[in-house]
Image (tube, rainbow, N blue to C red):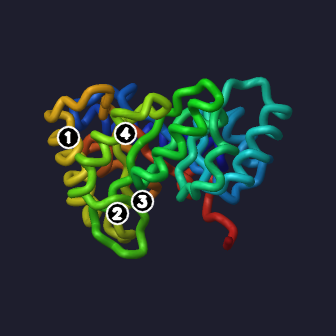
Amino acid sequence: MIPENLEWVKSRIVQTAKKAGRSPDSVCLVAVSKTISLEKITEACEAGAELFGENRVQEALDKIDRLGQSTQRNVEWHFIGHLQKNKVKQIIGRFGLIHSVDSTALAQVINEKSLAEGRITTVLIQVNVSGETSKFGMAPDELESALRAMSKMPGVKVEGLMTIPPYAEDPEKSRGFFTQLRELRDKMAELGIGGIDLKELSMGMSNDFTVAIEEGATLVRVGSAIFGDRPAD
């Protein structure tokens, strides 16, 4: 099931990107493997998945270590969940990208821990474009000051923005939120803040990733469409 699902998702990415006048290579698939067993992750890996997203630090670190022992394939891991400041030290150097930096204070901790290890950590800023109180992320009007602050943090490299719209059965209901994030990115890019390159837009999940691609997503976070419904937390 997983190989077939993965192939279907990849084909949809290619079709949607081409239809939108974009290169399929401009869209990267993040296979969201939170709560998924190592056996299923290994199956996805052997079927061609190269990038996995996790949202819990300890679970992710366990999987990273164990998958490295069970496959010879090169795999990249992204952290996509809410990150607590007291967990930052554990993940420095273990993830290719952190999608979910939701405050300047968190960025400062990442900066300090990265510099202590002689590293630069690549991040995206999570923006709460919907204004939902249940969602993490900074408000759009906080973004410029945050970017200016992060541009002065040598241990942090900001490469783009991430958002999670309200869940809706109809993917078209997500479009406006994706458009807002893209327009916000374009507005911030025009400011020309030194050291900030907002090339990435992480948006779109299993139910709405095609709409996200139409609106400019470069990273889509797809879980259940690949692995099936997750077990309850």
Secondary structure found at label 2: loop
Task: Measuring from the top left, give residue 209's x and y in whole percent.
Answer: 38, 50
Query: Which residue is disc 1 drawn over?
Result: 188
Pointer 1 with pointer 3, Cβ within 8 A: no
Q: Which residue is identified by label 4? A: 150
Give the spatial CA distance, label 1 vs label 2: 20 Å
**Residue 207 — which label?**
3
Q: First in sequence, mark 1 or 3: give its number.
A: 1
Q: Helix, strand, or loop for circle 1?
A: helix
Dot 3 falls on a residue whose secondary structure is loop
Image quadrant for the C terminus? bottom right
In the rendered view, does 35 fall on the left or right side of 107?
right
Which of disc 2 and disc 4 is earlier in sequence?
4
Disc on the earlier residue, 1 or 2? 2
Which of the 4 quarters of the picture holds residue 149? top left
Query: Of marks 4 and 3, which one's residue comes earlier in the chain?
Result: 4
Give, as a three-letter code, the residue at label 2.
Pro
Question: Closer to us: mark 4 or mark 2?
Answer: 4
x 28%, y 66%: residue: 130
| Residue type at the position of mark 4 | Met
Q: Earlier in the sequence, mark 4 or mark 1?
A: 4
User: Residue 89 bears which disc, if any?
Assistant: none
**Marks 2 & 3, CB-CB < 8 Å contact:** no
Q: Amino acid at mark 3?
A: Asn
Horizontal and vertical percent position of residue 21: 22, 31
4 and 1 marks in contact (CB < 8 Å)? no
N-terminal-most mark, 2 or 3: 2
Closest to the camera, between mark 1 and mark 3, is 1
Question: Could you say which quadrant of the image residue 85 lies in?
Answer: bottom right
